[in-house]
Amino acid sequence: MSCVGNASDINQTFIIEPLSITASTIVSACTALYANNLISCSGDTQILLDTGFISVNGSIYTNSNLSASTIYGSIFYSGGTDLYTVIDTFSISGGSFNPYNKIVTYKRKNNSSFNLLLPVRTFISNTATTSSNVLLQIDSITGITNNSNSFIISYVNAYKDNQDYGFWKRTLAINKVSGIVSIIGENADFDRISSGLTSNSVVYSANSGNVLISISGETSKNYNWSSNWEIIF
């Protein structure tokens, strides 16, 4: 049976009755079955393929779900918008991490961006050397959030040899209002120092919107210093 111009074409309507009436619900075509419409009389109509594919030159419409293990297409629309365009426009093109405020800034292809605050600990490090007891700035703590309170955890150590050394850990309570930082409190959490150094060998001071860390060593002794700090909002 075909509708391709052959003189033996049959231009009729065939009604396939359910199993309870005809004892068969199968239409078999070994080569091809041509029809302008396949209409369900009642219930569900299924087209089952063991292997092979359905090729459609026009559009496929469904009032329910379209399910497949793989769907290929050059354009997928949602509400009149090509989803490929949406995905490409808002896809991530890059990002950067600010260790001072622990924020990752992601950039999209459309030049917009969004931020993500990471719940991680990030220590900022710096180093210096001293050969005298003259006060030297080793670090400047920046990135303190304006109009808020925060804690600063600071670790400083000095090393010369097993006889000359120093370890300092401090917790600072910080208040910053209108860009001006105030050190509300300073707690000495840990001190281990050799005889030539003191608890005051490490000094913290407010400088406008930042906190400065300064160190002082010993005359004629070369110390290697390191500073590590973290802001806790």
Image (spheres, rainbow, N blue to C red):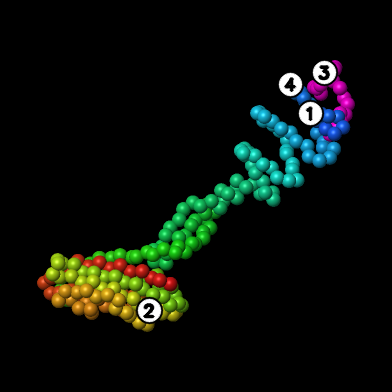
Direction from residue 12 to residue 201 in the image, left or right: left
Q: Which residue lies under the disc numbered 3?
A: 6
How far apart are the alpha carbons under marks 4 and 3? 15 Å
Q: Which residue lies under the disc numbered 1?
A: 26
Tell me where the magenta segment starts and ends, as one range: 1-18
Residue nearest the viewer, comparing 61 with 134: 61
> Which mark sits nearer the N-terminus, 3 or 2?
3
> Which mark sits nearer the N-terminus, 4 or 2?
4
Q: Residue at x 34, y 65 (%)?
A: 123
Label 3 SS = loop
Q: Nearer the viewer, mark 1 or mark 3?
A: 1
Mark 2 closeness class: few <14, some 14–19, many ≥20 residues within 10 Å: some
Direction from residue 58 to residue 92 in the image, left or right: left
Q: Which residue lies under the disc numbered 4?
A: 31
Q: In the displayed structure, would residue 42 be above or below residue 225?
A: above
Q: Amino acid at mark 2?
A: Ala
Label 1 SS = loop
Q: Position of residue 130 (x, y in %)?
A: 18, 70
Q: Amino acid at mark 4?
A: Thr
Q: In the displayed structure, would residue 59 be above or below residue 116?
A: above
Q: Amino acid at mark 3?
A: Asn
Q: Amino acid at mark 1?
A: Ile
